[in-house]
């Protein structure tokens, strides 16, 4: 019964947050910000442990993987566009992913973080389910990695529109790569709000970023 209740609470929080965000499209009202805060309040008021919540919450977390796979649909619809700009997309994502891994390692090293925390931080620029899996493989803490991923996604979703306006970026390719590479799932969701082309490019950028990161991390481990 508890499992069903917390699944229902989570879904209701999301639906309310989504409607609120549609009416007032501010980054701080995004479901990715509002829902976790609402759940923290609910858990605190009811004195429910995270372990109890996770009996139902984990079922929703497991849906992240099929949800990520669903991004393949717009990729198929915009195949011609993606093929036309393949070189530009790949170049941007490869450079962005490499910088993301190296900057994550450098920042944590400067802060004298433990190897476990460094491993938790390094995969922050790829989508949550893949990042958590990578984190566990290289000796990180998946739950901590999830926090880094969420912060990166929210931060990227806030900063990207400001950069786009400041640099007068108008092309759908540049916008899509910036959002998909820099803010993964959250950025891709924002890209779809701007247009189907931006969304498709952000989707493929997010997928390629995950592949590139998987290739770059072993190189980082060898150097480290």
Image (cartoon, helix red, strand yellow):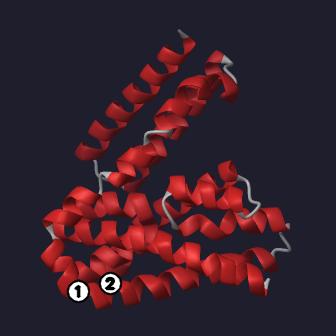
| Of residues 170 and 216, the one drawn nearer to the viewer in this rendering | 216
Element assignment for label 2 = helix
Task: Answer with the quarter of the image where residue 188 lies.
Answer: bottom left
In x, y percent, where is residue 212? 50, 78
Horizontal arrangement in the rendering, residue 181 relative to residue 79 (left or right): right
Task: Give the position of the C terminus as an image quadrant.
Answer: bottom right
| Of residues 136 and 184, the one drawn nearer to the viewer in this rendering | 136
| Of residues 149 and 83, the one drawn nearer to the viewer in this rendering | 83
Q: Residue at x 74, y 59 (%)?
A: 140
| Of residues 89 and 43, the one drawn nearer to the viewer in this rendering | 89
Horizontal arrangement in the rendering, residue 59 relative to residue 107 (left or right): left
Instruction: Count residues near mark 2 (Cα–Cα under 10 Å), then give few for <14, some for 14-19, many for 20+.
Output: many
Whether residue 67 is situated above or below residue 162 in the rendered picture? above
Instruction: Count residues near mark 1 (Cα–Cα under 10 Å), then give few for <14, some for 14-19, many for 20+.
Output: few
In x, y percent, where is residue 50? 67, 29
Q: Residue at x 50, y 39 (%)?
A: 61
Q: Which mark is residue 127?
A: none
The answer to whether residue 14 is seen in the rendering is yes
Circle count:
2
Q: Residue at x 14, y 64 (%)?
A: 77
The answer to whether residue 194 is seen in the rendering is no
- Name the residue tied to disc 1: 85
Circles 1 and 2: CB atoms closer than 8 Å: yes
Element assignment for label 1 = loop
In x, y percent, where is residue 165? 29, 80
In x, y percent, where is residue 26? 34, 54
Q: Residue at x 77, y 87 (%)?
A: 223
Q: Which mark is residue 89?
A: 2
Task: Answer with the quarter of the image where residue 27 lies.
Answer: bottom left
Q: CA distance from mark 1 to mark 2?
A: 6 Å
């Amino acid at each position: 019964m508890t499992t069903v209740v917390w699944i229902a609470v989570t879904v209701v929080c999301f639906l309310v947050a989504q409607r609120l965000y549609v009416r007032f499209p501010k980054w701080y009202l995004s479901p990715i910000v509002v829902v976790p805060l609402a759940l923290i309040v609910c858990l605190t008021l009811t004195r429910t442990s995270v372990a109890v919540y996770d009996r139902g919450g984990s079922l929703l977390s497991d849906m992240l993987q099929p949800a990520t796979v669903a991004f393949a649909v717009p990729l198929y619809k915009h195949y011609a566009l993606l093929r036309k700009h393949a070189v530009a997309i790949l170049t941007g994502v490869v450079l962005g992913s490499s910088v993301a891994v190296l900057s994550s390692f450098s920042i944590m090293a400067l802060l004298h973080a433990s190897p476990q925390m460094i491993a938790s931080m390094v995969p922050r620029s790829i989508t949550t389910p893949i990042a958590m899996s990578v984190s566990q493989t290289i000796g990180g803490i998946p739950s901590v990695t999830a926090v880094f991923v969420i912060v990166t996604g929210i931060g990227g979703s806030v900063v990207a529109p400001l950069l786009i306006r400041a640099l007068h970026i108008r092309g759908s390719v540049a916008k899509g790569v910036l959002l998909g590479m820099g803010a993964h799932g959250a950025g891709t969701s924002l890209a779809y709000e701007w247009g189907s082309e931006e969304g498709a490019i952000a989707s493929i950028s997010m997928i390629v970023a995950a592949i590139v990161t998987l290739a770059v991390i072993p190189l980082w481990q060898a150097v480290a």
